[in-house]
Amino acid sequence: MLSSTAGSGKQHHYAIDIMPYKQASGKPDFHGEPTFADMSIKASAGAGLSGITIRYTTDSRWRVNDTSSIQSQDYLSWSKADFDPTSGEVKMPGNVVAWAFIIDGQPNQFRYDITFHINPGNNSPGDLYRNRWGNALNQMPAQAMVVQRSISGIVWYDVNGDGARSSEDILLKDVKVTLLNDTDDKPAKSVVTPNDDLSTESDSQGKYELTNIPAGKFHLRFDPAPNTNWTHLTTTIQKASGASPSENSSASDILEDGTMKGAVINDIDFQKAEDMVDAASQSLDYNNCGLTGTMDTDEVSAGVKVRIQGRNWLSTDSFTLTVEPLEGAPSAALPSQIIINADNQDTQVPVNVYALPHDGSYKYRIHQETGSIPGLTYDQSVAILTITLTTDAAQLHRTAKAQWTDSKGIKVDTAVFTNTYQTQPAKPNDPGNSSNSDSGNTGNPSNTGDSSNPDNSSTPDNSSTPDNSSTPDNSSTPDNPGNSGEHDKPNPPVEPSKPVESDHAPSKPDQTRNSQKPVPGSQSSDDQAKSSTNSPSLADSGSDIVIPAALAVGTAVLGLALMYLLRHRRDQETELD
């Protein structure tokens, strides 16, 4: 301060300040080299800012103990500083050694308050700084002791959410930490560099520290690192039971629209120097901020596909893939079974990344269960799925990748299981065999019985039973010369007790049929045709059964026609007789 309260009549007023410096005797007691930071001037008691001049020197020879030894011709030769008469701000180099305040033409009474800051450099709490302020008439040395106020802590992610920081937890880097005034919620300013906000970022170990804090009441705000989202998180338990001050958390949520945007520690109070128990410093340590909750995680899936070779898919087709965790991999990350049907032949199986406890690789074996679909050979190969999880601690983000390896150890994008279908050959006597209905039975409606029954001959008038193997009329014995086809003698009348089917017929047609008639236990020609039709070779070639069937039907029709023609002729001869 520079003032005048009496009417001295002087028109020229000045004062000189010699900046602190370390002398050989160790006085004043401080560490490092202080530098000039800023200066401002305020006028009162009728004074104004016009007419003020500030001059300075960086010459170390003016580091003297007595300001009265500096004459006007000395300080008037110093460099002129930049002074703004509107704002009262003064700009000078940081390495100022001494400076002079000069005012001319002021009233008899005036007052100027001069405030300036120095950066003490590598100072320590308790360092003593002494300024020598005065002029030729007055010496007013002032000294100040350095008081250091600081706050520090750790920002971390609480993996298990128990509120106690442990070696398994994640230390968060690049989190923004800002000290805010309780009065206006604006950043506090450094006492050393008053234009700088008291703000910093946590390092790779999650640690932060703010120094050069003024006295007052504050709150500490924590904001996410760049490109980091905290909306899915929350602060962990505050001051958890059993946790030491260095391990616990004091932070609470800052909510916007119901979601977390940041964290805050309230009720931070820094004392004035005169109120400090320790006159040198006040350090508030262990102001930790612990976060917990679900990390932002990329979604990942694994592709699987089932193919059918040999036919198209049917709506009833269904295949089961079984998943087996390997080497302690958590079973909850994948379903235990994957069902594949016609609607999802090629599908993506989602991976539950939140079931994976920590960074690393997790393996799963996938194979196909053998089913019971007829004609299908099931693929019994095995595929290995490897899920790799990595965490970006600075962004609290987890990334998962899925990679398939086939049974040959080759990396593939999709696990493919190929099932092969092959048509089954037709079985003999299979009612479902369509070729059996196209056998020699065509054109013989009376032959509807079992083809294996010897009594079910393909010719109605020529049963293969032993009782009908040969009749007296059809025998070829010497007693029956009329069986040669000559009809000069009438046949004896038909006896009433004999069935109509026993009517005589010419010997040649009967002999033709009887020569082909099997002995008891053998097959008829129609049975032979059926047996041939049921064979695998004929089942594969439908045309092979046409000739035997046609011959059997033709023989039967020809025999019936000749029998009825001869019977009619015999009846005519009987009438003539």
Image (tube, rainbow, N blue to C red):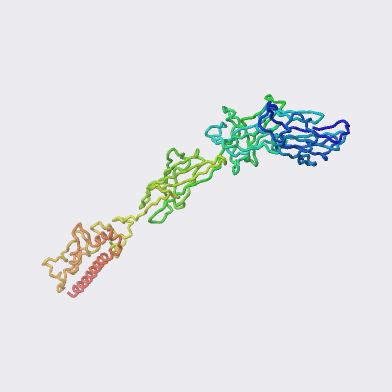
Choose between 416 and 200: the one closer to the eye. Answer: 200
What's the residue at 52%, 45% (across, down)?
Answer: 299
Q: Is residue 200 above or below residue 509?
A: above
Quadrant of res 551 = bottom left
Q: Is residue 212 visible?
A: no
Choose between 296 and 551: the one closer to the eye. Answer: 296
What's the residue at 25%, 57% (across, down)?
Answer: 452
Choose between 507 and 356: the one closer to the eye. Answer: 356
- Image-based side of 478 in relation to 199, left or right: left
- Name the spot of residue 109 as percent of width and height, x first: 86, 33
Quadrant including the N terminus: top right
- Name the spot of residue 352 as percent of width and height, x first: 50, 42
Q: Is residue 512 visible?
A: yes
Q: Is residue 271 above or below residue 567?
A: above
- Image-based side of 486 in relation to 69, left or right: left
Choose between 545 and 321: the one closer to the eye. Answer: 321
